[in-house]
Structure formats: structure tokens, C-alpha cells
Amino acid sequence: MKLLRKPLEPRTIATARWVAAGVGVFLLVALQVGGFGQLRLFGVYPEMLVVVVCSAALHRGPVVGGLFGFVLGFAKDLPGGHLVGLSGIGYAAAGALAGVLGARVFPDRWPVIAAAVAVGTAASQIVYAAGASAFGYSLPIWEIGPGVVGGLLAYHLLLTPFLYPLTRWLTELLLPGGLDT
Amino acid sequence: MSWLEAAFRDGLTPLFVAASRVSQSVSGLWNGAVALLQAHEENERLRQEVQTLRRELARLEEFERQNAALRAALDLPADAPRPVVFAEVIARPLNNWWGVLTINKGLRHGVEPQMGVVSPAGAVGHVRAASGFSAEVILLIDPRSAVGGLVQRTGEPVLVEGLGFPGTRLRLRPLSASVDIRQGDVIVTSGLSSLFPKGIPIGVVEEVSIGPFGLSVDVGVRPHVDFATLEVVAVLARSAPDADAAAAGEGGRP
């Protein structure tokens, strides 16, 4: 007797994708805070989540990019328990800007990817620093800002060739259908 | 710290530990390779340093004996050692604007907010928040950090503040108008609060610049602790319960 395997319900597939995305966010935050966050180069600790957000946003547009950025940034802020949500806003800005770029030009080219990561990195840091200042924290922005943004730009561009293909593959797997379909 | 933040942090702690071990192994391999290349010179330098430190130890033992004799003569109580909780660093700063570490000991291990944190090299910072199994330590370099100190040579009281990135410099604010601070002066903790006992090294004065008309003094301090490579720290339990109020005035600023 031949057993026919029943195809999975679209709702089950969607649920599985959401669960996988949730676990993915959890793992990414752990990797950022406990792993990448310890590897200092150019005088800074990298924020690999910004590279992931910009890489995903390039193919999924500004709305999904912004939302994804907010979720990742918010999750990253939670274990720190300080100014929770501010990184979320910064990463949302990064994702939205990268998404706009991806919607206007063909995203699968290295200059475009590098530009998206650079713009996203700068935007996330500027929004964070401005937000912290708005909450009354006297960050020495002009003294340390150029060093932070410059160091992160260099570091993130170094990470992009490794993180972009991985993020693109994972995005296709978990969030199928985007600007390039 | 809210229950959601505490639950999220405690849930992530095992992952932090695993990721941190992998990250430390990677950087350890690299550092090991570099160290092998410089092993001979390093060995020679360390031999000389051991000789110097042996002489220094003998001198300090004599001072300690004299100090104990003088304290006994003046009927002063002996310094009681404070209990410590050793902890491993499992996460680095969450972004580059703040100087924060996460350690793998929390409320369950006796680590509480407003406890001082030290390493063999000197003062590290203080605990800002703690959940069940981990705690967040604000480093001396964090812009929110302000710790009371003393200039070891003169005993002048000073306030040591963090500057944030790149985490290699502290700012020193003198607390008296006629201050005598010179390049090379050693800054130690003042011991005026429950955060740190007196005399824990903070750093060395690197530059002193006097403002126009001598109205302001800008002093840069290089910390003794290399915050980028810290792996294990010791959390100092409070010396006395009634000192908590004093600690609230030191260690943090908005």
C-alpha cells in the first residue's frame, strides 16, 4: 500500500516560520551580545545586527526592514535593561533606509549592499545618540561620535561579505516573497 | 529591572556563556599566536619585572608591619577583608556609547546593585542591575560612572568620571580649588563609600591642562584595568548595611 504524505497546511507552514524567526532573533541577540560583541576591532565592538537588518531590508523593502530592525533592536536592548527600545528605533531607521535603497536600485550588487550597510550603520548610531541625549544622558557626542561611527563603518563593511549571503538565504527561507520575487 | 528584562536576560545567559566561550577561544588562538612570536622578549621583561616586584614586596611587608604596629598603638580597628563573589564576563557592551559588562553571577549568588567590582589590576566599576543569574556592571569608563578617588601622593580628594568610547581614558575632577596634580600621579579609591575600600588603584594621571586664567583644570587619567580584555572579576560585598545610603551618592550619575 502506498502511503501518501499529506501536504502541510499553509497555516502550519506560516506558524513554523514565525517560530523559526523568533528562535532566530533569540540566537542573533545571543551571538551579538556574547559573541561578536566581544571582538573589538578599529576601537569598537561591532553591531552585527545592523548588517543583518540592512541585508534583509534590501530585499524586503522599507516597511519589513523597519519592523525587523525594531524587533531586533528591541530584543538587543532587553537584556541590558537600559534605554530599552532606543536601539529598536535606531535599527528601524537603518532597516527603513536600506529598504528604500533596495526598492529603488537593484540590490544584489556589492556597491549597493555596502552603501545600504554604511547608511544603516550611520543612521542607527545617530538616532541612538540623539535619543539618549533627548532622554537627558549627556553623551560626549562630538568627542566620541566620529570615532564610534567611523570604526563601526569599517568593521561592518568587513563583516558584510560574510553576513549578507547568510542573511539573504535565511530571509528567503523564513520570509519568502519580497521585492525581488 | 523589570521582570521581562530579568527573564529575557536570564533566558539568554546560557547562550551568552556559550557564545562568549567560542568568542574567547577565537581571540585566544589569535592572541596565543601573537604571544608565541614575542615570547623570548616577553620572558626577559617579565624576569626583570619579577626582580623589581620582589624588592617592592619586601618593602611593602615592612610597611604593613609598621602599619599594624601603629594601628595597635593608636587603638584603631584592623581593616576587615570584604567577602567577594568571583564572576566571569559573559557579554561586552551592548553598544559603543556605554561601558557595560554582563557577568554570570546575579542575585542568587549574592550579587546586588551598588556593589563594587574589581580585578587584579584595580577598580572595574559597580553593579547597576542584577537578575537571578546575571548582573550588569557599569565600568569606570561609562559616561554615567563617577567614583570618588584620592591622589595617592597628596591625599587630595577627586572625582573620577567616565568618558565612554574609546574606553581608554577617564576624566578627573578635583574637589578642591588649590589642587596639586601632576603627570604620573596614581589615583586610588577614596574608601568614602561602601562601593570600594580605600586604596584600590584606579589609574595614572596622563595629562594635566590648566584652562584660561587658571580657572579650570582638565585632567586625563589612564585606567589600570584593560576593560577590553577582562575575563574574570570580583564583586565586593558591602562592608556594612548602613553604608548603603552613602553608596547611593557615588557610582552613578544621570
Image (cartoon, rainbow, N blue to C red):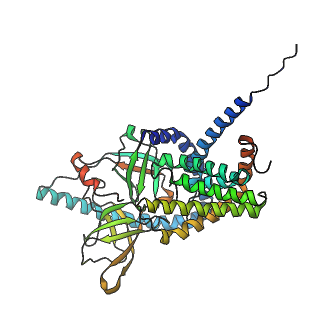
Q: Residue at x 50, y 57 (%)?
A: B229
Quadrant holding the C terminus of chain B: bottom left
The residue that appears at 75% across and 42% down in the rendered structure is A176
Task: Tell which of B70 and A7 is nearer to you.
Answer: A7
Q: Quadrant of residue A41?
A: bottom right
Position of the N terminus of chain B, as image quadrant, is: top left
- Residue B76 position within the rendered picture, expressed as x and y whole percent measured from the top left: 14, 55
Residue at x 57%, y 45% (from the top left corner): A30
Going by the image, does B47 lie left or right of A58? left
Furthest-bottom residue in view? B213
Q: Position of residue B150 (x, y in %)?
A: 28, 67
Q: Is residue A161 left or right of residue B171?
A: right
Residue reaching furthest to the top = A1
Q: Which residue is the extreme one toward the left?
A: B74
Residue B65 in view (yes/no): yes
In screen coordinates, is A1 left or right of B233?
right
Image location (x, y in percent) of residue A147: 55, 69
